[in-house]
Amino acid sequence: MSAAPRMSWREHLAVLAVFAALAVVGTWPLASHLSDAVLGPPGDNYEYVYKIWGVKTALLERGQSPLFNPDVFYPAGYDVSLSETTLANMALALPFAAFWGEVVAYNAVVLLSFVLSGWAMYCLARYLTGSRLAGAVAGAVFAFSPYRMAHLGAGHLPLLGTQWIPLAFLFAERAFRTKAVRDGALAGVFLGLTALSSWYYAYMVGLFLALFGALRWAQTRREWTGRRPLAVLAAFAVVAGVVMLPAAIPLLRNAGAGATEYRDLAYIDQWSAGVADFLWPSVLHPVWGEALARQYIPNIQEGVLYLGWAALALAAIGLGRRDRNLRPYMWLGLAGLVLALGTTLHVAGGPVRIPVPDAVARAFARGMYFLTEKAALNPLRFGKMDVAGTVLIPMPTLLLYLFFPFFTAMRVPARFALMAILSVSLLAGAGAASLAERAKARAGRIALSVGLALTLALDLASVPFPLGYSEAKGQPVDAWLAAQPKPSPVAQFPMERTWYGYPLYQQRVHGQPIAYGYGTFVPPAFREAEQILRRFPSEEALAWLEANGVRIVLLAQRSLDESWDEARALMGARQGWELAGRFEDEGLYHGGALMRLIPPTPAIPPSEWVNGDKKSYIQDTIWVYRFSGAGTR
């Protein structure tokens, strides 16, 4: 086995500088809005701006744990570990937040994710192939993949923390070559940092590192002696466990209480990737994206998984190298593709349903009920998937949900596509290296490099960012709330309007406790209250508000729609409540034509996107009612 090349510090700095420049260009106009906006329509982006502020405030100002927020889901409070804590990203953000505020911090971490993801993949490809061109191609394809750009638009900061993943594989690869305990320990460090970025990636990368280890062990087992394999494996496992421990303890506590599990197969299945999603060119493309979206638009948050025809062509050339060091990554990519296809086969859109005689359909349904609800270690409700006269095509990922511990906490199987993207990126770099080896003259290699850069840029471009940006500012009603005595707990209706990230950011602006919130899971202590409040307008909901100390109610007139007249009549007739003001929302979102083509669906809740003429985040008229005491009116 040939010695891997060593990278000088000058090469590292040059690579970081190149990817920094690409990050600014590739995410434009982010660099022009570092302090006043976030990319994408209003959604999870605001959630993570809020969490960065919460971590900074808790640690640097109050000296408290950042894992519990008493001002959200009032009066229960919010255990932040019920959603992604993304502590690795928070640690990167904290210095920026301390000096320049949470909006700059969020945007800085976003930009760093592109720089570091490109650099990390460069290091892995450079180590495996010895080629700088391979590193540059692999880094660019990985860092600027449509998968990452779509999650940037959705505001999924944890899923942008991909920089640690290539480094985990790099040091795992080094451990198989050097047999050094230190390299095993460093692989554990980067798996731990992966877990502290996203628990999805912890599970995903943990599984794929195990698969990688098995494949590389089959190749190299004769090279190992004595107890060295156990020492390297122990170093990896112990270090990874220690690094991820701060976030693992609350997660395991919540999982043990059943607070972080999805139990409906239909809900999980809707997040399965379709075969077309990997091959359909990105709808985020600035030239032909809108035209493609008129023909077929995947789930814009989770289904933009295009691998790139240019990258796939290069990957095919890379496989032709017949390099045994690359072979495990081919199998990792194939496994990632299969697992991303989710629990049942999808081609383009919903699950494939094959018409069959009723007797066959009933037999299939009985078998699926038995498998998913009786035999499973993690039962899933099959009922909504049972359609008379049809059968589904179950996929291997279903078995992971049914029989692997904690797997039911993973809502979106399509995210396994990241492992396919890592594989294609690496093999594409190897393909570029193969082409360069055939170009003997320096001029030919330069022309090849320029041609590859232009081809990949043309195929994968998403600039200017087609999902637009949202201003980081409060609303007029927030200024009024901020002037009220503290604490004056607030409720808002309809509750559907509160189930995304922006109302959390508004809480940061006005500072009042809120009897609602947003996160992956509702706190168990608030679940009964949520069911009561979702029935508003009702006497029961108002009685709960009064009994639990809520003193201000916000009614969004147009969002309430058909129940507006009933809600206003209820508040007007209820003793102790008085109309305190009326405010008009100001616009936040600056988006492009693509957003008008995206219809709200169960997988894309109406509160998530702003769709131009089909506004689903409504700039509303907010009526404010204040409780002044029972019987005072």
Image (cartoon, helix red, strand yellow):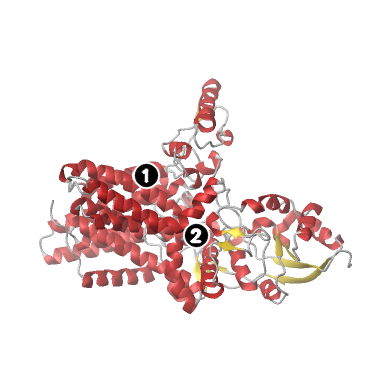
Give the Cα separation between the discs numbered 2 and 1. Answer: 27 Å
Which is more toward the observer, 144 or 98?
A: 98
Res. 442 visible in picture: yes
Relative to 21, is 97 on the left or the right? right
Residue drawn at (27%, 48%) of the image: 329
Q: Is 469 placed left or right of 223 in the picture?
A: right
In the picture, which quadrant includes the C terminus?
A: bottom right
At label 2, the amino acid type is Thr
Amino acid at circle 1: Leu
* Marker disc for residue 337: 1
Q: Residues within 10 Å of mark 2 (few under 14, many from 20)?
A: many
**Residue at the top extreme of this rendering:** 359
| Residue 351 in picture, x, y percent from top left | 49, 38
Q: Could you say which quadrant of the image residue 626 lies in?
A: bottom right
Tag 2 residue: 85
- Viewer can see residue 284: no
At x 37% / y 62%, what residue is drawn? 461
The image quadrant that residue 579 belongs to is bottom right
| Furthest-bottom residue in this view | 99
